[in-house]
Image (spheres, rainbow, N blue to C red):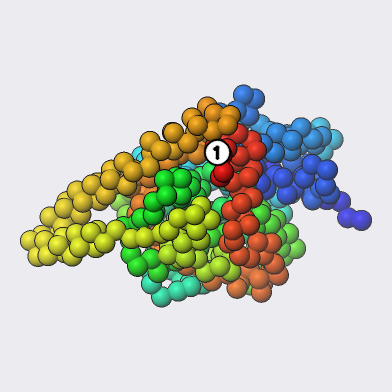
Amino acid sequence: MSQKPSAIIFGGLNTCSRALAALLVPPGGERLVSHLRIVDRFSVYPPTTYLGAEFPKVLAQPDVEYRQANLTIPSAVASAFDPPSGKAPYSYVFDLTGEINHDRSEVIAIKLTFTVARIIGLEAARRKVNAYVRLQQPVYETSDKGPHDEKEDVKPVRPLDVWWHETLRMLASIDDLPLVVLRIGFVYGPYVEFGLYPLVITVASIYGYMNKPMKTPWGPGKDGVNTVHIDDVSGGLWACAKWMASLGRQQANLTAGEKIYFHNDKSKIKDIEGTCIPDAQPIAPIFNLVDDSEMTMAKGGSMITEFFGTTFEFYSFFENTLAKVRLCYTISPKSFVDILKLKLDDVVEEINEHHVGTWTEMLQTSNPPIVQTPLDAYMDHWALSRRKLSYNNSKIKKVIGYKLVRPQFTHDALREVVDKWKAEGSWPALEGR
């Protein structure tokens, strides 16, 4: 039997690395790697980010190591690549780094997304690893005509998203880096508390508790908001690593390479070391990963609210407001933007006014009461913004042969999510619910 590879995961403790670690070294199960090191900026003893109930069991195993490090420092990253005495060098690198908080400044986004990935990528290339898998969060907006394959030039939306995209261009330009990119939809699953769907699940439960419909401003809800289960994110990362290790970067580019186009402000990249020139079109293997649910806002909202015994509706007044605001566009684009922002501010406050206090009530009346939870009920501008993300997932199935573990978004999957949160004391246990 050939020796199992060793792996190192950078970042993602607050997103997907915990689930990936559980796949690679499952407690009581067959290991996929001989040694695993996880490196991130957070502390785990004591925890400074949410870990979930099962991750400490993963860390308690032999040949599994967590290292807290400042990944903006090249020497700290280089040290993280040094294997323990007597262990083989790391052959698989999983890059799950990147800032996900949309209220952070662009300077922070550059430092914690672009710069960190560049330091890791350059060191990985120098170490001649066999596979470098970059996880790309759902930072793009697709057009109304979908689903979209990997060749289509999808656009990053906000400044944070632009630097996630610029990071791909930079990594793709590093010579000899065995890069493969996994571009995912909106993640859900046990112990996933970040992103869009955990928030929607939490808020839907509140409206179910209040016996009121949950509403959104964006009717009629046909826009894609494609989902992917955390088990498939982990499985897809592992499948990509094995695929890249079997081919090498040159052949992988020939088989699945895609051009990565410029979507930044030319003035912003001049002083950032490592950025590609705007005219460059670096190539890297890219794979979309979403489930087969073809989830839309209307479908997802209806399924989740139905699970909690309520309904999903749209704010009719918001569409009327938009119609009035569009008339203002004849005055000036600035007037249009200013008025639209004002109306959206009103909607944000009105929506949160209905449910945030009720979430606190649910936590306090739980048996036993919940004193600390990673789940938040406040829906900010980012959470209430219109989403359009519709990916075609056929390429990863055909080229890599990946088979979805959780192909459909179901009520059973939602029940598993809620039950595990409830079991660890993060979700209110209410009589009759």
What residue sits 50% from the left and 65% below the top? 295
Dot 1 corresponds to which residue? Answer: 430
Image quadrant in which the C terminus is located: top right
Instruction: Give the residue displayed 38% in from the left and 36% down from the top.
Output: 357
Residue depicted at 58% across the width and 31% down the height: 367
| 305 or 14, nearer to the observer | 305
Residue 300 position, x and y percent, is 48, 61
Q: Residue at x 41, y 45 (%)?
A: 210
* 424 lies above or below 126: above
Q: Is residue 197 above or below residue 406?
A: above
96 relative to 305 in the view: left or right: right
**Residue 169 visible (yes or no):** no
Residue 45 seen in the figure? yes
Question: Where is the N terminus found, in terms of image quarters?
Answer: bottom right
Of 307 and 420, nearer the camera is 307
Left or right: where 105 falls relative to 363: left
- Amino acid type indicated by mark 1: Leu
Q: Residue furthest right?
A: 1
Q: Label 1: state its secondary structure.
A: loop
Q: Position of residue 270 (x, y in %)?
A: 35, 49
The quarter of the picture where residue 292 lies is bottom right
Residue 331 image position (x, y, % from top left): 7, 61
Q: Position of residue 235 (x, y in %)?
A: 69, 57
* As drawn, 75 above or below 235: above
